[in-house]
Amino acid sequence: MKKLTLLLLLLMVSTNVFSKWTKIGGNDEVTSYIDFESIQKEGNNLLAWALGNKVKVWMLNDYKLSQIQINGMKYYSDIVHYEFDCEKDSQLVLSAKGFSGHIGLGELMSSVGVSNATEEIVPGTISEIRYKTACDKK
């Protein structure tokens, strides 16, 4: 009975984790998902517009091959809190968590905080797809 209860609990948790992610694109290396519910809102307006066209949103990156961190740990997915500047075509990683399994599942392998390095969005990359989705540019 305990095994059945544990299995049902795990299925509920993993279903809930995956259900908020919407696929937005990918390439031969990675598939990216967005959590549209995580876009911060203030009243009926996106908080982004109050902050000078910046959007903060959570995204999940699921890699086809394992990625290797500086400390040698491997991971297959990460959940990243991005801040996109919709006027300056740039992104800033606010935090990131790497997981041993696909789609944000498995063991937490790393967790990092705010990066001070703003990155320019490069046309034709998965970063551009993330940026356009978050900023709602076509």
Image (tube, rainbow, N blue to C red):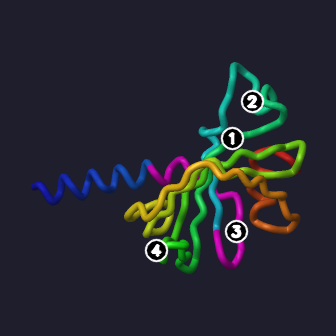
Q: Residues within 10 Å of mark 2 (few under 14, many from 20)?
A: some
Judged from the image, the secondary structure of the residue bearing numbered disc 4 is loop
Q: CA distance from mark 1 to mark 4?
A: 27 Å
Ranked by sequence position, the earlier of labels 1 and 2 is 2
Q: Nearer the viewer, residue 69 or 29?
A: 69
Few, some or many residues within 10 Å of mark 3 (<14, 14–19, 20+): some
Few, some or many residues within 10 Å of mark 1 (<14, 14–19, 20+)? many
How far apart are the alpha carbons under marks 1 and 3?
A: 20 Å
Circle 3 residue: 26
Q: Which residues are magenta?
A: 17-30
Discs 3/4, front: 4
Locate the N terminus and report the quarter of the image it occupies.
bottom left
Residue bearing mark 1: 56
Q: Is residue 87 left or right of residue 92?
A: right
Mark 3–mark 2 distance (CA, rounded to whole Å): 26 Å
Front: mark 1 or 2: 1
Label 2 is placed on what type of residue?
A: Leu
Amino acid type of the residue that numbered disc 3 sits on in the rendered structure: Gly
Give percent across and percent down for residue 90.
82, 52
Q: Is residue 23 magenta?
A: yes
- Give residue 46's mark: 2
Q: Going from the N terminus, do you reach mark 3 or mark 4 first? A: 3
Residue 127 horizontal/vertical position (percent)? 76, 61
